[in-house]
Image (tube, rainbow, N blue to C red):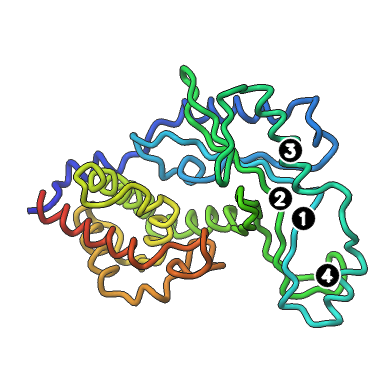
Amino acid sequence: MAIPEDQLTQWAQIGAQVTSKDTYATIKLALESSGAGYKEMNYKIFLQGSYRNDTNILKESDVDVVIMLESVFYYDIIPLSEPEKAAFSAVHPAAAYTAKAFRAHVMEVLIERFRDDAVPGTKAIAIQPFHNRRKADVLIAVQHKKYRRFTAIGNDEQVTGICFFKSDGTKIVNYPKLHRENLAAKNQQTNEWMKHIIRIFKNARQKMCEQGVLERGQAPSYYLEGLLYNVPVDRFGNTYDDSVVKCINWLLQADRSTFLCANRQYRLLDDTPDVSWNTKDCNAFLSGFVQLWNGW
């Protein structure tokens, strides 16, 4: 047996967009408060995750919002030569406004607007659902720049991302813009099949969790997107059945240790904690999918 084409077609469809847009608009309006302690700073507010990448499914609820400070940035200059490091340090004195102050100011705004519905978590601030407002996670971040070359401001080579701090102080650097852009480019290369298959994978994950084949949290959407990003273009197309079978068979036979995250800055598996998946959970997802497919 196999999962029928009509079921795959249903799973491939994008989830609700209106309520997620309204939720984002509500949170964005709150963060743009004229009384915010960061109002004089340069910052950006944007969506990330499934809703921003157009890979959300019907049962998905959380809206991921990022507020990123741009007036200040963290950096990685380890790859630079000693003269380059000296040149960089000479024109980048320590900033007066800190990430800690920014987080405190954002928290003030969220608590003032959402009261008890704003709940600090390990990584983000959860905004609880209310009426038509979906649950949202607000990530408080600072711009991050990884330098490959530096001679002077404007004469450099860098990769720009974000960084944020977990509640235990752990610093995490990631690249949501690169993830989104690379995913969109690969989707175009597959004639827009890839994002449909991502949604099928995510719905299959939901089914596996319901059946106890997979534990919740073992296969985050971000990593499923990264997994399919590594699949060759010629495995997508024709029918959903054909695409899923070709993708799964290729993934089972491939050397997954070579896979990259969609941002292409980290290996997908067993690289840096908090930004890479682990082989055990990836294997559990793939074997669970095969079990789900064959047992349908």
Tag 4's secondary structure?
Answer: strand
Tag 3's secondary structure?
Answer: helix
The answer to whether mark 2 and mark 1 are in CB contact below 8 A is: yes
Q: Residue at x 43, y 68 (%)?
A: 269
For the residues labelled 4 and 2, the Cα–Cα distance comes to: 22 Å
Between 144 and 112, the one lying in front of the other is 112
Q: Residue reaching furthest top? A: 131
Q: Is residue 203 left or right of residue 139?
A: left
Q: Which residue is mark 2?
A: 142
Q: Which residue is mark 3?
A: 104
Residue type indicated by callout 3: Ala
- Mark 3 or mark 2: which comes first in sequence? 3
Residue type indicated by callout 4: Asn
- Mark 4 or mark 3: which comes first in sequence? 3
Q: Residue at x 17, y 46 (%)?
A: 5
* 68 versus 151 height, above or below: above
Q: Nearer the viewer, mark 1 or mark 3?
A: 3
Between 63 and 149, the one lying in front of the other is 63
- Mark 2 or mark 1: which comes first in sequence? 1
For the residues labelled 2 and 1, the Cα–Cα distance comes to: 6 Å
Residue type indicated by callout 2: Val
Residue 168 in the image: x percent, y percent?
61, 52
Q: Which residue is mark 1?
A: 73
Kindly identify which numbered label has been placed on residue 155.
4
Tag 2's secondary structure?
Answer: strand
Q: Residue at x 29, y 68 (%)?
A: 251
Between 253 and 197, the one lying in front of the other is 253
Bin the neighbour count of mark 2 within 10 Å (Cα to Cα): few under 14, some 14-19, many 20 and up: many
